[in-house]
Image (cartoon, rainbow, N blue to C red):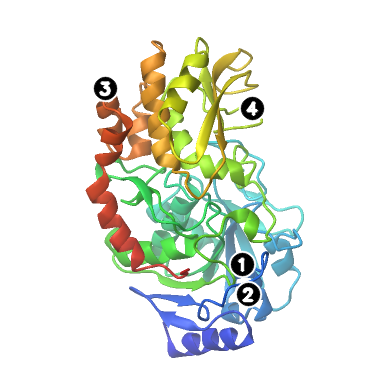
Amino acid sequence: MSLSRRNLLTAAGAAGAAATAPAAGAAAATGAAEPAPRARGRVRTGFDRLAAAGYAALAGQRVGVVTNPTGVTADLRHLVDVMHADERVDLTAVFGPEHGFRGTAQAGGSEGRFEDPATGLPVYDTYLKSGQELAGVLTASGVDTVVFDIQDAGARFYTYIWTLYDCMVAAVLAGKRLVVLDRPNPVSGRAAAGPVLHKEFATFVGREPIAQAHGMTVGELALLFNAEFVPEAAGRAAELDVVRMSGWRRGDFFDTTGLPWVPPSPNMPTPDTALVYPGTCLFEGTNLSEGRGTTRPFELLGAEGIDRRWAEAANGLELPGVRFREAYFQPVFSKFAGDTAGGVQLHVHDRAAFDPVRTGIGLLVTARRVWDGFAWRSDGWIDKLTGSTWVRTAIDRGAGTDEVVAGWREELAAFRRLRREHLLYRD
């Protein structure tokens, strides 16, 4: 980072955004020391702090924003609309991820290239673009700095963090600077959990070896990516700045932040969905419904022919923080659309004790034991979600929950050590 830019960000800190702190590679995390214990509802996002500083960190830059409907202020105005109306920002482009900038597309879709009716800004589609192709999009947009502001859900296979990673690699290739505006991990920043991706299983639901429930904010992930993975993919680290939040602590769940929840994707309607998602999304890799097409996606699981025995078996595991109710539902789309599926609904009664990944494994183990129709998807999706063949092969040979979970103990411990080096917020 140039001396002038470092001074610029330090000035932004004095104005309320954050002072610069050195980080791995070419990265810098902006933000003052974590404040004293705060009153409920006092979290200010990276965007809040950037705006409070008069956008000083973007001065003199042609700016493009990677965002979606979650990029909102505390009063629910979208940051693109806010920045476009502010003469202190030269906002010239928007980049839309999966589901699109304005959020009109379902899972596996995007909005394509268009002109935003509200602002007249060109919107470029980033979905499924990476490397030189995405670098070409950034170059064509004419921006100097790419700003990223999207609410994550806390799971490795939630694709927005890989949009971030792809944009970081592309920014290096295109010679652009990248600024990440941090937001809370909605399921808290507790210790990471679950298996770590093996590189041979890298896809858009997991580019690099991080844990299934990473327990990090997008800003922290950006620092980790920049130190560990981006140089290998792009030849050097990105020119990266992270604008920190204030008031957020690692044990905070989303409903304690005072921030409005905007669904980051159509099947992530509430923070309760995000809480269970790192475990129950594994059912995407099976022939059971993961609850898409219902009002409780990822909380309702089932298939035709499953009855009360699954809930009984799952409750018999005595998994911490959760109970299971026998449930029947009729999805309006996706698996079993229009048909009645039987299964379970998760009821989390102690979210601090709840382990979503262990719960997901326990549900897979018991579903396979009580329902003779159980099958994995034929495309190997379960291996892509879990990051290796371990979960599938262990369950197929009859392993129980404890044995499956023990299979990733060492790799998870290694990731936790790596993760610790890049944490911005502490209790």
Query: Amino acid type of disc 1?
Result: Thr
Q: Which residue is mark 1?
A: 45
Which mark, residue 49?
2
Separation of marks 2 and 1 at Cα, in angstroms: 6 Å
Mark 3: secondary structure: loop
**Front residue (pair 63, 335):** 335
Does any portion of residue 374 appear in the rendered image? no
Q: Is residue 199 left or right of residue 28?
A: left
Give the distance between the C-alpha atoms of the residues marked 3 and 4, in whole angstroms.
31 Å
Question: Label 4 amino acid?
Answer: Thr
Front residue of this view, candidates 148 and 403:
403
Position in image of residue 341 (x %, y %): 57, 15
Do labels 2 and 1 touch, CB within 8 Å?
Answer: yes
Reading the image, the residue beneath label 4 is 294
Q: Is residue 383 left or right of residue 125?
A: left
Q: Is residue 209 left or right of residue 315?
A: left
